[in-house]
């Protein structure tokens, strides 16, 4: 029987793959039904679909005992854990998420050729880096603050955090894509051959990673007692004997 760590790596891979693939499928259906217009009514309707979609993936993460599609989520907990947890996250979990995302993009392109191209930077690198970093910082603050305010009511917390992610995504969608997910961004960039470009590394990797570290540090000043409890409980199932 596979160890908890191997199951977690497999879960990260599967959830990351499913996030990219199902997201592309959902967008394709939305474009075909709603069109490409972005009127206020259409945006509200798309957001009303996106929020339950995020809630589903939050449930999927719990069902897989920690599987995640976003390296920033893994990093958020890893930097508050011990060295073993940090190395396991950096060397195993995040690579699994990246590989899952790449395969998801490859399947998307084979199913919907030429229909999707991933996030696109519509401003200069400095503005893009600031935007993606700010969006990431805000969502880290929101999620950790919700854990502090109401650690027991996961349902309400999940819906609020999901709605916040959708709002922040919409705010950044015309600037950087508002993706806040290095693995998904890498999947698209790798397939397009731009994964080693300065634009991709600075905007979609360095900026959100630095913002995550800063957000966790800022929250630890106020939320340290509860955050350590949450981190220890989250990782207790995955520590090796």
Image (cartoon, rainbow, N blue to C red):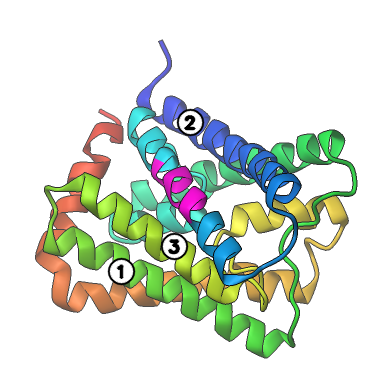
Q: CA distance from mark 3 to mark 2?
A: 22 Å
The answer to whether residue 171 of the structure is visible from this angle is: yes
Q: Residues within 10 Å of mark 1 (few under 14, many from 20)?
A: some
Q: Residues within 10 Å of mark 2 (few under 14, many from 20)?
A: many
Residue 142 marker: 1
Q: Residue at x 35, y 46 (%)?
A: 84
| Up/down of 241 relative to 136, above or below | above
Q: CA distance from mark 3 to mark 1?
A: 9 Å
N-terminal of the pair, mark 3 or mark 1, is 1
In this rendering, would 43 be left or right of 55? right
Q: Return the x and y of residue 79 as percentages of the image width and height.
A: 35, 61
Residue 192 location, quadrant = bottom right
Residue 213 marker: none
| Up/down of 205 relative to 238, above or below | below
N-terminal of the pair, mark 1 or mark 2, is 2
Q: CA distance from mark 1 to mark 2?
A: 25 Å
Q: Residue at x 42, y 51 (%)?
A: 74
């Amino acid at each position: 029987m596979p160890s908890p760590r191997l199951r977690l790596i497999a879960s990260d891979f599967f959830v990351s793959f499913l996030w990219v693939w199902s997201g592309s499928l959902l967008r394709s259906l939305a474009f075909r039904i709603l069109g490409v217009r972005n009127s206020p009514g259409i945006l509200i309707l798309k957001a009303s679909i996106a929020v339950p979609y995020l809630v589903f993936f939050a449930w999927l993460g719990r069902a897989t005992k920690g599987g995640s599609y976003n390296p920033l989520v893994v990093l958020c907990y890893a930097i508050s854990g011990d060295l073993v947890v940090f190395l396991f996250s950096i060397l195993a979990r995040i690579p699994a998420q990246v590989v899952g995302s790449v395969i998801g993009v490859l399947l998307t392109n084979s199913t919907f050729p030429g229909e999707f191209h991933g996030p696109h930077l519509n401003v200069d690198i400095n503005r893009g880096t600031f935007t993606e970093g700010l969006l990431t910082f805000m969502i880290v603050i929101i999620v950790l603050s919700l854990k502090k305010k109401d650690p027991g009511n996961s349902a309400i917390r999940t819906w609020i955090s999901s709605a916040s992610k959708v709002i922040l995504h919409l705010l950044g969608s015309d600037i950087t894509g508002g993706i806040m997910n290095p693995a998904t961004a890498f999947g698209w960039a790798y397939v397009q051959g731009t994964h080693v470009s300065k634009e991709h590394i600075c905007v979609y990797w360095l900026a959100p990673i630095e913002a995550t570290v800063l957000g966790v540090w800022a929250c630890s000043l106020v939320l340290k007692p509860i955050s350590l409890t949450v981190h220890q409980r989250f990782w207790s199932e995955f520590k090796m004997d």
